[in-house]
Image (cartoon, helix red, strand yellow):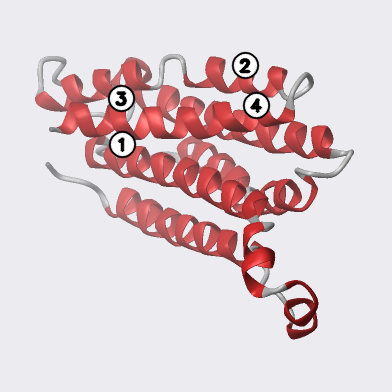
């Protein structure tokens, strides 16, 4: 399928942003200092870093699922326009911001202010899901950026993406709402949703 140079550049730029954001996540897992190790032992210090591992894993999987769907989307989109650039930019804005709430969650998950950290984290994930849905909605409305043949394989795959993400924003909004009641349940829900959407993609592609 023909793709104009504009879509290729958009995807290349987006891939760079995804790569930087997903790499920054691991920087929030702090290596214990020698002084701390001498006082408490390395094994103990590595064990108490579990909030950082949880935050990293959840965020990594979330960004990975978004990147996979973004790539799938761009295998179908044939052209771009000015508004589409801004929709894509909005998605990248929230993805770029994501390492901050990840660090916040890792630092304060066991703190009395953990609920605030969970609010910011789940709110950001919800915003990412909305931006992605808006991007896909704009691209597919009236076949705007897709091939014009309504019976083409591209259209069939586009419907699959739409079905996959139909309840994404609603489910992440639920996680955001739950974060005001229980930070641990809301983060567990985010992790579960990332695993669920990844598994759904694998099953559909197999």
Query: Which one is closest to the eye, mark 2 or mark 1?
Result: 2
Q: Position of residue 198 (x, y in %)?
A: 34, 35
Residue at 66% across, 62% down: 28
Query: Which one is closest to the eye, mark 4 or mark 2?
Result: 4
Q: Residues within 10 Å of mark 3 (few under 14, many from 20)?
A: some
Element class at badge 2: helix
Between discs 3 and 1, the one toward the N terminus: 1
Q: Which residue is mark 4?
A: 186
Q: Position of residue 135 (x, y in %)?
A: 46, 31
Query: Which one is closest to the eye, mark 4 or mark 3?
Result: 4
Q: Is residue 177 above or below residue 23?
A: above
Between discs 1 and 4, the one toward the N terminus: 1
Q: Pointers 3 and 1 in contact (CB under 8 A)? A: yes
Q: Pointers 4 and 2 in contact (CB under 8 A)? A: no
Q: Residues within 10 Å of mark 2 (few under 14, many from 20)?
A: some
Element class at badge 1: helix
Q: Which residue is mark 2?
A: 174
């Amino acid at each position: 399928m023909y793709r104009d140079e504009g879509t290729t550049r958009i995807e290349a730029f987006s891939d760079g942003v995804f790569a930087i954001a997903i790499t920054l996540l691991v920087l929030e897992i702090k290596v214990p200092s020698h002084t701390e190790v001498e006082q408490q032992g390395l094994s103990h210090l590595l064990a108490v870093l579990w909030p950082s591992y949880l935050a990293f894993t959840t965020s990594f999987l979330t960004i990975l699922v978004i990147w996979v769907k973004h790539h799938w989307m761009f295998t179908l989109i044939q052209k771009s326009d000015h508004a589409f650039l801004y929709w894509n930019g909005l998605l990248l804005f929230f993805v770029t911001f994501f390492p901050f709430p990840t660090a916040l969650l890792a630092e304060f998950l066991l703190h009395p202010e953990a609920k605030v950290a969970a609010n910011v984290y789940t709110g950001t994930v919800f915003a990412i899901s909305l931006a992605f849905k808006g991007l896909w909605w704009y691209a597919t409305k009236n076949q705007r950026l897709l091939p014009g043949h309504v019976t083409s394989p591209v259209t069939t795959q586009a419907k699959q993406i739409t079905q996959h993400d139909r309840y994404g924003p609603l489910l992440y909004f639920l996680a955001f709402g739950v974060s005001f009641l229980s930070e641990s349940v809301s983060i567990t829900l985010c992790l579960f949703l990332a695993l669920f959407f990844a598994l759904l993609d694998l099953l559909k592609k197999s």
